[in-house]
Image (cartoon, rainbow, N blue to C red):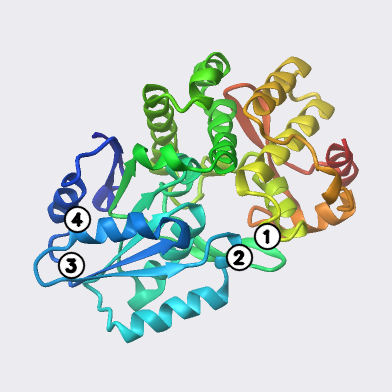
Amino acid sequence: MQSIQVSLGQRSYPIYIGLPEATELALAIRKHLSDASKVVLVADKNVVPIAMKLRESIAFGSAQTVVIEVPSGETSKSVRQLETLWQQMAYLKVDRKALVVAVGGGVVGDLAGFLAASWNRGIRLVQIPTTLLSMVDSSVGGKTGINLPQAKNVIGAFWQPHLVWIDLQSLESLPEREYRSGLAEVVKYGVIMDHAFFAWLESSIEAILGRDPQALEFLVKRCCELKAQVVSADEHETTGLRAILNYGHTFGHAIEALAKYGTFLHGEAVSIGMTMAGRLAVKLNRWSDEDYHRQTRLLSAYGLPIDFPAQTSRISAQEMLQAMQLDKKTAHGNLQLILPSRIGHVETVAGVAQQAIMDSIAG
């Protein structure tokens, strides 16, 4: 297993990436978290078999190890589901020495992460992402939270894990739509931070879509390196640097909410959102047509949507704008948008005219 360090002083933690032997996770947990009183694995319904194997492999000493199943899908990131988990934690008498292990995609990572952050004012957390999207993005950085019906991720906390364990074997059985959804976040890293990585993504389409193990290991490692670099420099979004990771997300989160959670996978909504943000940057003469078309060609090559499909065309630009104004980066009613200036670099832009935003949504 290769490892990357997220440098946050006393709260620093490793990200392990690779194709581990069966005993390696248990050894890593014992190395970092040997005093756990209980181990609570919170698992997406679709990966419960993986969680049960993990339960057997990491059981140690007198620590009780249990698996709690949550329904699949974005609707699980809700107050109701969180309350159910709190009740189960109370029934299990989970104390402050316990460990929460999130097993699944971004939904479970966010939900279980907020569970760990809120239970007894914070207990330890391990992230074990099983989808490409959660491996390259949501499992790293400590953002946790749940949704309200009208807005995504508005309730939450920064709560860093003690370690992130990325077993690339999980990707072998990942459904094709879920896999391609994760590639939107991968393309995002190229656009916002790394021109050379973007060019590699352009030249490696066949290998990536074919889930070539070497290509995947490089892809996941590079995304985690870039995310760790940003998080280490701006953990709580106080300097504005971390906001660049939200490229396409202000548009994308509004799409998810308006289309009803679950209609789009997160990466699909982000792909459409990146297209809208890129189109806006071109309209504002901040980005070239050539770079914009490179982005749309790459997203399309990975089978990602770049516009609303027919069944969601009823969403108006005005509705989108209203939903976007609930975004966490809005200040004094003004949207703070992440827009590209070249492939490999983006900037935070405020004061964009509402009509220009609506025009970019409408196409």
Among the 4 quarters of the image, the one containing residue 88: bottom left
Dot 4 falls on a residue whose secondary structure is: helix
Give the labeled residue for mark 2.
75
Which dot, 3 or 2, sits closer to the camera? 2
Residue 177 lies, with reference to residue 114, above or below; the image says above
Q: Position of residue 52 (x, y in %)?
A: 30, 61
The residue to which callout 4 is attached is: 57
Mark 3 to mark 4: distance in Å?
15 Å
Sequence order check: which comes first, mark 1 or mark 4? Answer: 4
**Marks 2 and 4: CB-CB under 8 Å?**
no
Q: Is residue 333 something one can see in this rendering?
A: no
Query: CA gap, disc 1 to disc 2?
Result: 6 Å
Q: Nearer the viewer, mark 1 or mark 4?
A: 4
> What amino acid does circle 1 point to?
Tyr
Q: Residue at x 43, y 54 (%)?
A: 104
User: What whole-number distance in Å separates the C-alpha atoms at marks 1 and 3?
Assistant: 35 Å
- Look at mark 3 in the image and give the residue it sits on: 36
Q: Nearer the viewer, mark 2 or mark 4?
A: 4
Of pointers 1 and 3, the one earlier in the residue sequence: 3
Q: Amino acid at mark 3?
A: Ala
The N terminus lies in quadrant: top left
Q: Residue at x 13, y 65 (%)?
A: 35
Q: Where is 169 relative to 343, above or below?
A: below
Q: Position of residue 214 (x, y in %)?
A: 37, 22
Up-down relation of residue 79 to residue 265 (above or below)? below
Q: Which mark is residue 261?
A: 1
Q: Residue furthest left?
A: 61
Question: Is the residue marked by circle 3 packed among few (<14), some (14-19), or many (20+) residues within 10 Å?
Answer: many
Nearer to us: label 3 or label 4: 4
Q: Residue at x 87, y 39 (%)?
A: 356
SS type, badge 2: helix
In the shown orientation, is residue 109 left or right of residue 282? left
